[in-house]
Amino acid sequence: MDANKAIRTKRAVRQFSNREVSREDILSILDSGRRAQSSKNSQPWYFIVVQDRAKLKALSETGNFAQHLAGATFAVVFVSQDNTPWINFDLGQSAAYMQLAAWTMGIGSCLANIYRPDDARHILGIPPELNCMVAISFGYPAAEPAPAKRGGRKPLEDLVRWDQW
């Protein structure tokens, strides 16, 4: 699947099958995130791969809309030393690369905001000076993802300005 097709067809997947994701595919997804661009090539991220069912369930309770983590085959929790806007942008780049790489393998994903980072730190043993605000659930979809709805995206001409506002 080429990049444009992956971008056009990617859907958030919140329900996962019991099919395991191979370690090779997990490493490939992580490597895609590692290769993302970052400000001054700082690579401000650490990735915690969570496969333990009890930890996935506990993490699903650290965000108001993170329940999908409990049913994931695995999750990746993003950890950084800083919480500045440019670091968050860099983490977003890494997250997008991971999700698109997974999608090309038929593996679904969904972002989860961690609203209670102290709880997540406790669950995963993350030192208090580090940030963990985002996780991604991954797994093979339980059902075929629905096609995009017509009109689901704003028209490009409503979003783009040329040379000035």
Image: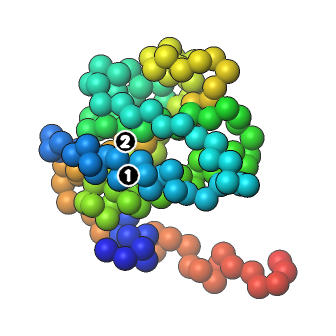
Asked if residue 114 can be seen in this view, the reply is yes
The colour mode here is rainbow
Q: Which residue lies under the disc numbered 2?
A: 137
x, y percentage for residue 148?
36, 69
Q: Nearer the viewer, mark 2 or mark 1?
A: 1
Residue 50 drawn above or below residue 154: above
User: Residue furthest toward the left?
Assistant: 19
In the image, 155 versus 162, the foreground residue is: 162
Q: Identify the residue at image location x=29%, y=25%.
A: 52
Mark 2 or mark 1, earlier in chain? 1
* Residue type pointed to by label 1: Ile
Q: Quadrant of the C terminus?
A: bottom right
Q: Quadrant of residue 48?
A: top left
Residue at which label 1 appears: 29
Label 1 residue SS: helix
Residue 72, above or below 39:
above
Instruction: Using the image, tell me which numbered label, if any, was put on residue 111.
Output: none
Instruction: Tell me which amino acid carries mark 2.
Output: Ser
Q: In this rendered view, identify the residue nearer to me: 15 or 6.
A: 6
Nearest the camera: 43 or 110?
43
Q: Is residue 13 visible?
A: no
Numbered disc 2: secondary structure: strand
Residue 102 found in image quarter: bottom left
Q: Residue at x 26, y 38 (%)?
A: 73
Residue 51 pos. (x, y %):
30, 31
Total number of numbered labels? 2
User: In the image, 113: left or right of 31?
Assistant: right
